[in-house]
Amino acid sequence: MSIYLAVPAALLLASLPRPTAPANAQSQAPLIGRWDLVIDAPGRHTAGWLEVRHSGRSMLVGAFVGTTGSARPIARIDFREGAFAFTIPPQWDDSEGDNRFDGQLRGDSIFGTVSYANGTKLTWRGARAPALRRAAAPAWGSPIRLLNGRDLMGWKTLGEGESQWEVVGGVLRNKKGGTDLVTERSFADFKLRVEFRYPKGSNSGVYLRGRYEVQVEDTPGTEPTIDGLGAIYGHIMPNELAALGPDAWQAFDITLVGRRLTVVLNGKTIISQQEIPGITGGAIDSNEGAPGPIFLQGDHGPVEYRNIVITPAK
């Protein structure tokens, strides 16, 4: 389980020098790795993620996921004597301009501030993300039906809007954009069967452990995209767009063991034993080492689900 540094970031950063471009080799910099973040933002979306990699001998680059949206590239991370800084381009909720991050590394913890182009400044903190490597293949338990076909027993809504979820004729239906829906039970490793149907142009998603979104949407065209149907939103692009189109019932068969993921869409394996690098935008939290719920995105548009069956590892 991740443990975060509980020291106010703003106080500790006040006297730090701004980092400059590294003069020496950075290929072994202690900042390299993946970090699970908590951003002190208003509302329920506070989870973030950072990856730092080396590029050649003297540069650090990476990727960042904020409270919403997909992974954004970091072209350059300046790091010296424990202090680091980088900027990322705007995306959905911060379209005014680039965001600047200033941080400090202390052991296996990082903390700092993010300054948005509109003048808002927030603090954040984080810890190294767990590897989630499993020593052996799991033994599977008994299948569990997550929908009883009558009502929402076993589920709860998330969000401040009005819930649009209802069960009609054995089908779980979100009439229009409203709240998200999440299971009351949590799971670690599992196999998951989900049948879904969306109207033209709609958008939803199935979050695994509440942290990794498998995209559900009416993806246009004939080629897969990193944010289209079957993608791990912003992280992993499927090898083909195996969609049946709007208004047709479709099915995911998903296996998640640690970070290793296989996704079968409509009988075609579109992701095979790929490693999920980190959380996706909108995750319930960034505590990747803990079990989590199945989370259905309902704040974007109408969608229907049925026959949701999970087989957890023993």
Image: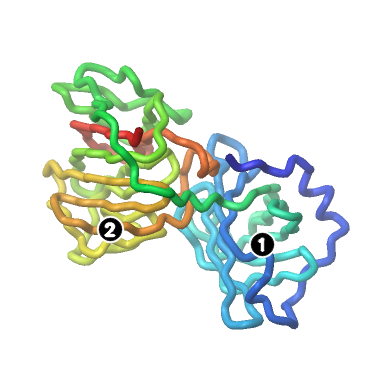
The answer to whether 303 appears left or right of 163 in the picture is: left
Check disc 1 and report its element: helix, strand or loop.
strand
The amino acid on which the numbered mark 1 sits, given as a three-letter code, is: Arg
State if disc 1 and disc 2 touch (CB < 8 Å): no
Q: Name the residue rendered at 61%, 38% in the picture.
A: 42
Percent position of residue 89, x then y: 55, 65
| Foreground of the two, 153 or 301 | 153
Q: Nearer the viewer, residue 240 or 304?
A: 240
Residue 97 shows in this picture: no
Q: Residue at the front extreme?
A: 136
Local crowd size for mark 1, using a 10 Å CA cut-off: few (<14), some (14–19), many (≥20): some
Residue 181 located left or right of residue 102: left
Q: Nearer the viewer, residue 246 or 266?
A: 266
Residue underneath mark 2: 271
Q: Where is the N terminus found, in terms of image quarters? A: top right
Question: The residue under label 2 is which amino acid type?
Answer: Ile
Q: Is residue 104 left or right of residue 293?
A: right
Bin the neighbour count of mark 2 within 10 Å (Cα to Cα): few under 14, some 14-19, many 20 and up. many
- Seen in the picture, residue 22 relative to 276 is either above or below; the reply is below
Measured as percent of width and height from the top left, residue 256 is found at 34, 46
Quarter of the picture holding the C terminus: top left
Q: Which residue is mark 1?
A: 100
Q: Position of residue 224 (x, y in %)?
A: 25, 63
The first of marks 2 and 1 along the sequence is 1
Front position among marks 2 and 1: 2
Q: Secondary structure at mark 2?
A: strand
Q: Determine whether, in the image, residue 236 is placed left or right of residue 175.
A: right
Q: Position of residue 96 (x, y in %)?
A: 57, 59
